[in-house]
Image: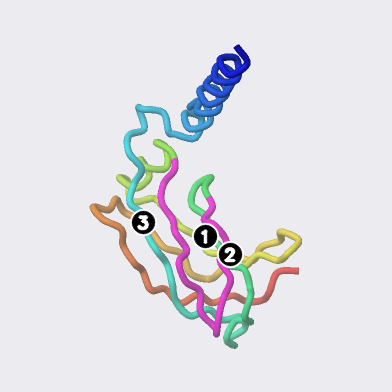
């Protein structure tokens, strides 16, 4: 009897833990379709015409979306991924009004925008973009 009860409880626990509510909450609504292909940005970065300090945080912003922050290495940044995350952002791609801005971020969350921007278009495949960034100063 104890083994049947133990088997029942173990089975119930497995079924409950395999629920899909968390997965469903992170998936985009069906009307938005599949995710768009990303742009992957990389290049040299400078502050006041000097190579950027190693370990400085750089991120990109597009619409209400932000890329994951990356840290610089030897005056360069790599693998800043940008793609639309909503239907409204995807519509901007079709109108060629999808402006990406690049930012330095301090540990306190303050940011400084680069002089450069980039206009995204709808892609048929991921695209790597080499773009050198220039900043006037470091964020406080």
Does 25 lie within the magenta span?
no
Q: CA distance from mark 1 to mark 3?
A: 12 Å
The residue that appears at 44% across and 43% down in the rendered structure is 85
Q: In the displayed image of the protein, which residue is found farthest to the left? A: 124
- Estimate the spatial distance between the alpha carbons at disc 1 and disc 2, rounded to whole Å: 6 Å
Mark toward the viewer: 1 or 3:
1
Q: Residues within 10 Å of mark 1 (few under 14, many from 20)?
A: many
- Tags 1 and 2 in contact by the CB under 8 Å rule? yes
Residue shown at the point (42%, 73%) measured from the top left: 131
As drawn, 3 above or below 38: above
State the image quarter where residue 126 is shown.
bottom left
Secondary element at image label 2: strand
Q: Earlier in the sequence, mark 3 or mark 2?
A: 2
The answer to which quarter of the image holds residue 55 is bottom right
- Asked if the stretch drawn in magenta spans residue 68, the answer is yes
Could you tell me if the residues under marks 1 and 3 are in contact, i.e. CB atoms within 8 Å? no
Label number found at residue 103: 2
Q: Residues within 10 Å of mark 2 (few under 14, many from 20)?
A: many
Image position of 85 (left or right of 7): left
Residue named by callout 3: 120
Residue marked by disc 1: 60
**Residue 138's x, y, as percent?**
68, 74
Magenta-drawn segment:
66-85
Identified at 67% across, 76% down, the residue is: 137
| Disc 3 to disc 2, C-alpha distance | 17 Å
- Residue lying farthest to the bottom in this orientation: 50
């Amino acid at each position: 009897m104890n083994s049947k009860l133990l088997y029942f409880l173990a089975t119930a626990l497995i079924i409950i833990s395999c629920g899909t509510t968390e997965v469903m909450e992170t998936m985009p609504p069906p009307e938005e379709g599949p995710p768009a292909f990303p742009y992957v940005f990389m290049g040299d970065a400078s502050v006041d015409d000097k190579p950027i300090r190693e370990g400085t945080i750089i991120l990109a912003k597009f619409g209400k979306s932000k890329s994951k922050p990356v840290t610089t290495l030897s005056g360069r940044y790599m693998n800043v991924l940008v793609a639309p995350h909503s239907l409204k952002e995807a519509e901007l791609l079709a109108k060629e009004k999808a402006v990406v801005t690049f930012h330095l971020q301090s540990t306190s969350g303050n940011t400084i925008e680069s002089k450069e921007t980039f206009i995204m278009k709808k892609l048929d495949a991921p695209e790597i973009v080499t773009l050198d960034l220039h900043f006037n100063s470091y964020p406080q």
